[in-house]
């Protein structure tokens, strides 16, 4: 099980460790249920970790506009396990998306400082 907190803006935040080679970076990511990818981090973090570029993807934003994102390969520590994921580059605070939560239960106590819990669902074949 993983734990986070609800910040002053009532956003659910979870710490996540991004790894590439021998570089590690711990970030607090806002859980964004409208984001269907794994993780989105600023280009400055991608450069700092030297994450390899994979491809460019066209995405539709919440306001209906379309934009292009560079997608990079990364490794994260998720629920105590090493997991290979795709990371989108965007000039935003780190966002954790629904692909990262697939196969997990999300519980949020929606008060400032409230508990955010993510735990693996039993008997699921999701990865």
Image: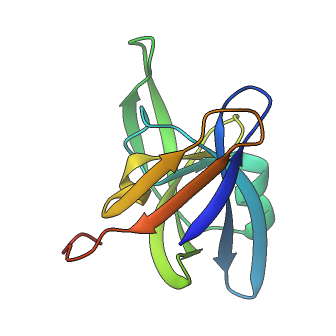
- In the displayed structure, would residue 22 be above or below residue 18? below
- The x and y percentages for residue 19 are 66, 77
How is the rendered protein coloured?
Answer: rainbow
- The x and y percentages for residue 69 are 50, 39
**Nearer the observer, 31 or 95:** 31
**Nearer the observer, 18 or 79:** 79
Q: Quadrant of residue 59?
A: top left
Name the residue: 81% across, 63% down. Answer: 48
- In the displayed structure, would residue 54 be above or below residue 89? below
Name the residue: 30% across, 64% down. Answer: 103
Q: Could you tell whether 124 is left or right of 19 in the image?
A: left
**Nearer the observer, 67 or 31:** 31
- In the displayed structure, would residue 115 be above or below residue 74? above
Name the residue: 76% across, 37% down. Answer: 7
- The x and y percentages for residue 111 are 69, 32
The mark tally for this picture is 0
Q: Quadrant of residue 58?
A: top left
Name the residue: 77% across, 42% down. Answer: 113
- The x and y percentages for residue 37 are 41, 48
Work out which quarter of the rendered image holds the C terminus and state it: bottom left
């Amino acid at each position: 099980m993983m734990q986070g907190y609800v910040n002053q803006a009532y956003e659910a935040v979870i710490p996540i460790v991004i790894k590439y080679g021998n570089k590690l970076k711990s970030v607090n990511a806002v859980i964004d249920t409208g984001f269907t990818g794994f993780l989105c981090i600023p280009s400055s973090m991608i450069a700092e970790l030297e994450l390899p570029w994979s491809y460019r993807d066209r995405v539709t934003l919440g306001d209906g506009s379309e934009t292009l994102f560079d997608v990079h390969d990364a490794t994260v520590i998720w629920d105590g396990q090493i997991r290979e994921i795709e990371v989108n580059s965007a000039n935003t605070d780190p966002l954790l998306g629904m692909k990262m939560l697939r196969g997990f239960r999300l519980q949020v106590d929606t008060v400032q400082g409230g508990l955010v819990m993510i735990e693996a669902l039993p008997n699921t074949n999701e990865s």
